[in-house]
Image (cartoon, rainbow, N blue to C red):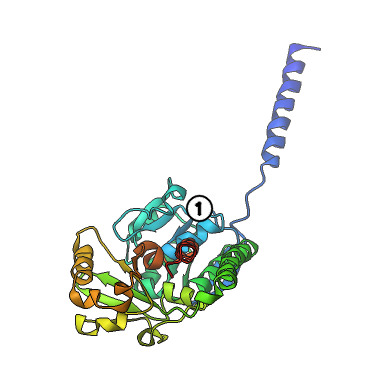
């Protein structure tokens, strides 16, 4: 065999190998497959298996993490940091502003293939987000966290995982109802201190819906299905109950905590029956209200179980 012939044969083998290698590299078509989703804005066409998801609500972030989906971008907590109970799962996730002030440019820079927001929070920036990537919205927040969780599960094709997570949550509700049924006649009051405001929390709130699921009674002044009532000190009696759980929305400037201190030191607050009976307890605002997702819900149930176990309720 001549050297020339050998060179031709080797060249053919190399070419054939390269061709075979290239032909085996099939294109990832997962992003080419789409599904239609009914959302708060109408009908959206989104990837069947999104790889780069940006989430624009805290409760949505909790949902994604619970479903095993790590977003490429997410909104931070109210003070600009990740919340303590989720921060370890958000390493390498890029912040894209806050829930109430999304940084659209930061969202675009992440080149997402799916954006998940909320109509109540983000209706005004819907067109901007939609121009970046397919975008879907849940409708509202507050007491709708369970409906939103199911929506996110469907959007992400994680319905079986979502069903399991929700069953785990509901099993905890059942545990409380079955083991502490003699405590369910307790009237539980929810009071929140904010900069320049004091609110009592009614039915259409995160913590309000959870108390209702368990079956706790609420004071007469808090049995409405609305969101909240703002009160002045002259109406502080509306915050009374057999037990008071109070929480404070603090933005880092000390004003929320100052409001709390002013009110709990007031003689009117100290005259409430729950306070006189040592049944007024401060709880974590992030867990009991602000985060508003499935992880916070489970932590709130943990708090309530401990209060019940310690006979504080």
208 versus 66 height, above or below: below
150 versus 110 height, above or below: below
Q: Where is residue 145 in the image (x, y as percent from the top left)?
A: 48, 71
Q: Can residue 109 be seen in this view?
A: yes
Q: Which of 54 and 160 is in front in this view?
A: 160
Residue corresponding to mark 1: 70
Residue 246: name its quadrant. Answer: bottom left
Instruction: Please indicate whether residue 231 sits to the left or right of residue 90 in the image.
Output: left
Q: Where is residue 278 in the image (x, y as percent from the top left)?
A: 33, 69
Instruction: Please indicate whether residue 167 sits to the left or right of residue 110 in the image.
Output: right
Q: Which residue sits at x=58%, y=57%?
A: 31
- Residue at the extreme right: 1
108 versus 293 height, above or below: above
- Residue at the extreme top: 2
Q: Which of 106 and 210 is in front in this view?
A: 210
Q: Which residue sits at x=37%, y=53%?
A: 82
Q: Which of 94 and 19 is in front in this view?
A: 94
How many numbered discs, if any?
1
Q: Can residue 214 be seen in this view?
A: no
Q: Which of 243 and 49 is in front in this view?
A: 243
Instruction: Please indicate whether residue 198 sits to the left or right of residue 188 in the image.
Output: left
Q: What element carries label 1?
A: loop
Q: In which quarter of the image is the N terminus?
A: top right
26 versus 243 height, above or below: above
Q: Position of residue 110 (x, y in %)?
A: 42, 52
Instruction: Please indicate whether residue 69 sits to the left or right of residue 221 in the image.
Output: right
Q: Position of residue 136 (x, y in %)?
A: 48, 69
């Amino acid at each position: 065999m001549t050297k020339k012939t050998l060179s031709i044969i080797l060249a053919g083998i190399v070419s054939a190998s390269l061709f075979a290698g290239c032909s085996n590299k099939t294109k990832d078509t997962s992003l080419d497959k789409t599904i239609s989703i009914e959302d708060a804005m109408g009908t959206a066409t989104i990837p069947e298996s999104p790889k780069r998801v940006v989430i624009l609500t805290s409760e949505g972030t909790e949902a994604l993490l619970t479903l095993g989906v790590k977003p490429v971008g997410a909104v931070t907590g109210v003070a600009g940091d990740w919340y303590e109970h989720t921060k370890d799962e958000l390493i390498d996730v890029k912040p894209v502003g806050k829930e109430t002030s999304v940084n659209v440019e930061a969202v675009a820079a992440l080149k997402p293939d799916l954006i998940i927001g909320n109509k109540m929070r983000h209706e005004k920036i819907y067109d901007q987000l939609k121009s970046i990537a397919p975008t879907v919205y849940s409708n509202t927040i507050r007491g709708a966290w369970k409906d939103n969780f199911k929506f996110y599960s469907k959007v992400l094709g994680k319905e079986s995982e979502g069903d399991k997570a929700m069953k785990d949550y509901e099993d905890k509700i059942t545990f409380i109802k079955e083991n502490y049924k003699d405590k369910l006649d307790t009237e539980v009051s929810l009071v929140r201190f904010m900069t320049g405001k004091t609110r009592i929390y009614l039915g259409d709130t995160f913590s309000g819906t959870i108390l209702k699921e368990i079956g706790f009674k609420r004071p007469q002044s808090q049995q409405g299905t609305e969101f909240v009532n703002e009160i002045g000190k002259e109406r502080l009696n509306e915050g009374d109950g057999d037990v008071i759980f109070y929480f404070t929305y603090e933005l880092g400037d000390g004003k929320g905590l100052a409001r709390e201190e002013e009110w709990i030191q007031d003689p009117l607050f100290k005259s409430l029956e729950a306070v006189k009976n040592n049944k007024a307890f401060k709880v974590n605002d992030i867990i009991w209200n602000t985060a508003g997702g499935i992880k916070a819900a489970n932590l709130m149930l943990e708090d309530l179980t401990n209060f019940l176990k310690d006979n504080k309720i």
